[in-house]
Amino acid sequence: MQISKSFIEQYNDDNLKAHQRKLDFSTSEIENSEAIIKQLVDFQIAIPSWALGTGGTRFGRFPGGGEPRSLEEKIEDVGLLHALNQASGAISLHIPWDIPTDANAIRNLAAQHGLKFDAVNSNTFQDQADQALSYKFGSLQNVNKAIRKQAVDHNIEVIKHGIELGSDSLTVWLSDGSCFPGQLNFRKAFQNTLEGLQEIYAALPSNWKMFVEYKCAEPNFYSTTVGDWGQSLLYASKLGEKAYTLVDLGHHLPNANIEQIVSLLLMEGKLGGFHFNDSKYGDDDLTAGALKPYQLFLIFNELVEGMNARNMNHAKDLGWMIDASHNVKDPLEDLLQSVEAIMMAYAQALSVDRQALEIAQNENDTVRCQEILQNAFRTDVRALVAEASLRAGGALNPIGLFRNLKVRENLIKERGFKTIATGL
Ligand code: AOS
Ligand code: ZN
Ligand code: ZN
Ligand code: ZN
């Protein structure tokens, strides 16, 4: 299924009046609204290939129908999202779930949909059918050198696929760790992992980045070998200038101050990018902004402040990715919601009166500081996000049009009801 330009235009025309009224109000309220809209138009968030189907828990999986059955169909799905919001212009692949057998054809297909390839992800947290050695006791940390080598070789293979597709970064998330005290020599596990990462790093093309993703727990519940931002930063610093820390919002211990982590990683030039999602308990992988929109805003507030201070290109210098899983929602609708929530947090952060905030900070005027941030957070920026979508050729309300066009129903007709996408 493809969404034609004329459908989008018709939909926007039908909704233009109501939109204009809201936009007029927003632009009269928000001083730099024109600059914000321009920044939003340039802002793209990569969609993870593994979030296009229904996820599951260890208790069950309830597919919703019409899920992509191949890499080609995953690209088509992201193409649908991008056609609707013009803000999802990239896909992040996972090897071996998405092996491109004909890289040229895959590249062309993506280009037809206006998509780029964001970070490629390796997988040493599962055993594949044709795999010689098991990762049951870890991959890069493993006490067995042959297993470590297998994991290194796999990552190098992933880089090769990425090169063929025009990607320029590798995300390494390791499930390595231990379930019980005494199981692991922490120092040796760290050293083995570092050695493996160094071998992978050596295989990176010069323009590539490596993202080292940390996670506090799961599937290992006593220790994780890349367990927090300190450990990730340690690896990234030892590896070199192409290595960065990746922050997945769901990978922290409860109540961690993620915005402060973000600020300091940026300060050190070691923030690589994000896996956006939301959570209440752990790695819940829920829709971004669904539970803690204020936290999302505070993260963007630090991002805007830090990127400005370092003269960074907001759109290009960080990896903006979603990492999500859906048990009860239509995956595509959920992803549209996540992208919109991220755009709103970004827009609100861009609207913060930075000068006034700095003055208030220097005067220790805590009340004023809070007022400035909360004023931005409580400002309705939905019309700015809609306007950015409109100007870029997307729909004023992507989910509205998705439902209007009965996209899911059409996908079910095309692909069938009992489809299962590879992924988590
Ligand atoms: C795992 O918890 C991490 O968030 C990974 O980034 C990601 O979910 C995984 O690579 C997808 O399989
Ligand atoms: Zn992640
Ligand atoms: Zn995760
Ligand atoms: Zn997650």
Image (cartoon, helix red, strand yellow):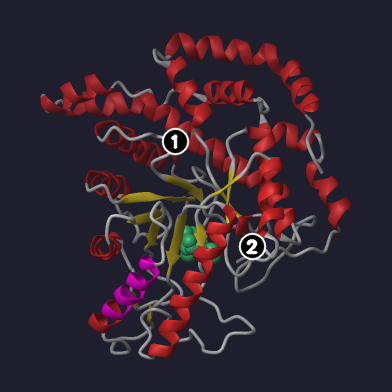
Q: Tell me the chief SS of the magenta region.
A: helix
Give the residue number, with chain letter if any, for mark 2: 55
Q: Position of residue 56 (x, y in %)?
A: 63, 66
Seen in the picture, residue 240 relative to 153 is either above or below; the reply is: above
Where residue 226 appears, as percent x and y from the top left, is 33, 69
- Seen at 68% across and 27% down, the residue is 395
Q: Residue at x 79, y 55 (%)?
A: 66
Q: Is residue 170 above or below residue 199?
A: above
Between residue 301 and residue 392, name the one nearer to us: 392
**Mark 2 within 8 Å of ligand 1, using the beta carbon:** no
**CB-based contact (under 8 Å), mark 1 and mark 2:** no
Q: Residue furthest left?
A: 363
In this picture, which residue range is highlighted in magenta?
191-202
Per the image, the residue denoted by label 1 is 315
Q: Nearer the viewer, mark 1 or mark 2?
A: 1
Q: Secondary structure at mark 1?
A: loop
Secondary structure beneath disc 2?
loop
Nearest to N terminus: mark 1 or mark 2: 2
- Is residue 368 covered in magenta? no
Amino acid found under the numbered disc labelled 2: Gly
- Horizontal relation, residue 221 to residue 68: left or right: left
Q: Residues within 10 Å of mark 1 (few under 14, many from 20)?
A: some
- Picture coordinates of residue 60, whole percent (x, y): 67, 71
Q: Amino acid at mark 1?
A: Ala
